[in-house]
Image (cartoon, rainbow, N blue to C red):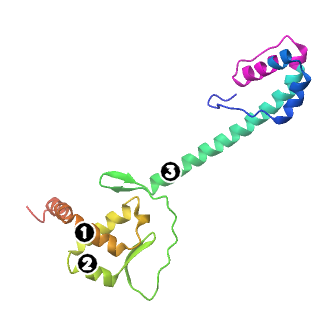
Amino acid sequence: MAENKKSFVAYADWKETFDALSDEKAGELIKHIFAYVNDENPNSECMLINAVFANIKHTLKRDLKKWEKQHEQRKQAGKKSAEIRKRNATVVNGRSVSSTDNVSVSVNVNESIYRSFAHLSISVEQFNKLEAEYDKSVIDSCLDSIENFKNNNKYKSLYLTCKNWLKKEPKKVEDKLVAQAKKHGYVK
């Protein structure tokens, strides 16, 4: 059996085989089966056990091959999925965040959109309301943070979310912008 396989299938139709054997021989057969699936290479001196086990052995081998094939397919699918997540990952606050949600977007064409992502969008009009209170770079930074936020699928309105985030953390955003300005030499 495979090293990391922890179980095997016993079939209900084997009952007839076990019923035909004495309790002693049925016990020997089940012990022989368990020794086989645990890679102990059992060898019975009883011709009856060897004969009965031959059919069971073929079934166990067939099941093992099927399991190994599925295991390999799942392993490859997992690797492929990890590669895709890694490729699509975005760095937010020094840590990698990946988006695995597939979201369909429906946008009203009549409304001019300032920005949209996933299922959220903010209109130019809503952006202008925010810009009356905050600098454009602060708003854009907040929108970036919301877009990269892992649980942004819970939000219904990008405008209201951004407004609330800006209210809660104006000092944090301001400090971040000052640090960026210093980094680029705009402020000493």
Going by the numbered disc 3, the residue's amino acid type is Glu
Which x, y percent locates residue 107?
A: 47, 80
Q: Secondary structure at mark 2?
A: helix
Label 3 vs 2, first from the N-terminus? 3
47 horizontally vs 137: left or right: right
Alpha carbon distance from label 3 to label 2 = 38 Å
63 horizontally vs 97: left or right: right
10 horizontally vs 73: left or right: right
Say which quarter of the image contains residue 88: bottom left
Which x, y percent locates residue 160?
A: 33, 74
Q: Nearer the viewer, residue 25 or 113?
A: 25
Q: Is residue 107 above or below residue 181?
A: below
> Dot 2: within a 10 Å radius of its alpha carbon, few (fewer than 14), some, or many (20 or more) residues?
some
Which of the labelled discs sits on residue 130, or is there none?
2
Say which quarter of the image contains residue 98: bottom left
Q: Which residue is mark 3?
A: 83
Which x, y percent locates residue 38?
A: 69, 23
Q: Is residue 152 above or below residue 124?
A: above
Going by the numbered disc 1, the residue's amino acid type is Leu
Q: Secondary structure at mark 3?
A: helix
Magenta range is 28-50
Residue 142 counted in the magenta span: no
Label 1 vs 3, first from the N-terminus? 3
Say whether marks 1 and 2 touch (CB < 8 Å). Answer: yes
Q: Secondary structure at mark 1?
A: helix
Going by the numbered disc 2, the residue's amino acid type is Leu
In this rendering, the label closer to the viewer, 1 or 3: 1
Q: Which residue is mark 1?
A: 166
- Residue furthest to the left in view is 188
Q: Residue at x 81, y 35 (%)?
A: 11
> Dot 1: within a 10 Å radius of its alpha carbon, few (fewer than 14), some, or many (20 or more) residues?
many
